[in-house]
Amino acid sequence: MLQISIVGLVVVATVVLVGLFWKNSRARPANKANQNKQNTTQAAEQDVEHIFNDEFREELRNRGRLHFEKIIGENAMFLQQDLRLTTSQLNDYMKQEITRTLQEEFTKYEESITDAKQLAVDSIEKTKVAIDEQRQILGAQLEKQVGEEKDRLIGRFEKNMADIINHYVLAAIGNQIDLSDQLEYILGELNENKQAIIEDITNGA
Amino acid sequence: MEHDTEGGMKLPLGVIGRVDTGHLQRELAALDEFMNQAALKDDVPALPRTSKLLEELATDNHVDLSRAKERQQLMKDFKSLLSNAPLLHISFASDPSPAFLRKLLSWIRSEVHPRVLLQIGLQPSIAAGCVVQTRNKYFDLSLRRHFLEQSGELVKRLEVGA
């Protein structure tokens, strides 16, 4: 930008000098060419001295500063606009990128969750099937053992039925059975075995 | 002196086992000794008071205990009885009463043997009935044996009931 401004100043100064020179050349007649030529040369030199004196330089400097400031201001405005636009675009871009990235991550995360969920469901199903099988096996074993135990208890009960009932009768009414009430039963039993008793008494050594 | 049909002495129902026969034997000996001592003194003493069992024995066998000859015959027969009388061992679930024993002994002496002596035992586990042991045999006449014989029927009834 600074180079462009300097070039612009040089071009302006050149144009001004050419314009003054062209004006002086038209104002004097051709017959006074020599004198005019000298005057012109002198005037040109004076003008040049006049143009490039300190005031003119100061003016040029001021103009250049103003122009430079103007250009700087415009460029700053453009730069600000560009910066805002760029910032806005960058924001949009960042939003889009972040949104896209988040969307992708969420998608991956969702897929991972879905996979994990499916894995867990499969595992639970397998476990459930295994538990069902185990339960059936245990149920069958338990049923078998209960059946065996039941048969064993029934067999034992049947085998010891007489003792059990005898024990129960003894515990229930053992002290209440009077021998006098049993006399008829005892005599009947003795009568059934009378012959064997007599034979043993008679013939026994 | 009278004897029963088998030629032995008649035992009263009060004489149940060897304990009673032992008491009678000792009482008879003591009585005989007392009477003999009295005879040596040329004294005619009154018959001393005897036990009810001895009186019953003398009455059943028609023996006059004041006569030495009959008394000695009774002692002799009684001694013979102790060596020859069959012994039945009967066990009950509880102690039998004297009346029960008299009825039982009466039946046994009338149906099995007139001079049977009993030895009473106690087996609470038989619940009811009795267990009889002779010299060589064992007769389980208890309710337990009855239950054992009927265990099949009991099982059948239980199965029907279930």
Image (spheres, coloured by chain):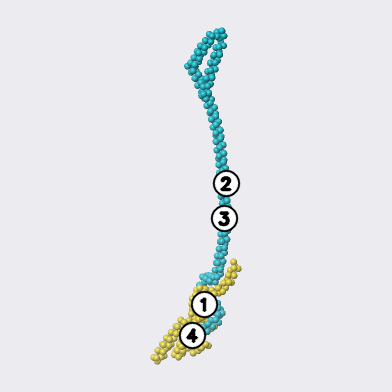
Chain colours: A cyan, B yellow
Q: Residue furthest left?
A: B41
Question: What amino acid is labelled 1 in the image?
Answer: Val
Q: Chain of mark 4?
A: B
Residue at image location 52% in from the left, 73% down from the top: B127
Q: Secondary structure at mark 3?
A: helix
Q: Quadrant of the C terminus of chain B?
A: bottom right
Q: Which mark is residue A130?
A: 3
Question: What amino acid is labelled 4 in the image?
Answer: Asn
Residue placed most toward the observer, B121 or A61: A61
- Establish whether labels 3 and 2 are both on one chain: yes
**Callouts 1 and 4 close, C-beta under 8 Å:** no
- Circle 4 is placed at which residue position? B84
Q: Chain of mark 2?
A: A
Residue at image location 54% in from the left, 17% down from the top: A15
- In the image, taking residue B78 as reference, residue A133 lies left or right, namely right
Q: Secondary structure at mark 2?
A: helix
- Circle 1 is placed at which residue position? B131
- Circle 2 is placed at which residue position? A114
Q: Secondary structure at mark 4?
A: helix
Q: Is residue B126 above or below residue B85?
A: above
Q: Residues within 10 Å of mark 3 (few under 14, many from 20)?
A: few
Q: Residue furthest top?
A: A31
x and y, in percent, of residue A163 in the image: 53, 71
Q: Residue furthest right?
A: B160
Q: Is residue B69 visible?
A: yes
Residue placed most toward the observer, A40 or A71: A40
**Callouts 2 and 4 close, C-beta under 8 Å:** no
What is the quadrant of residue A194 in the picture? bottom right
x and y, in percent, of residue B138 in the image: 52, 78
Q: Chain of mark 3?
A: A
Separation of marks 1 and 4 at Cα, in angstroms: 23 Å
Residue at image location 57% in from the left, 48% down from the top: A118
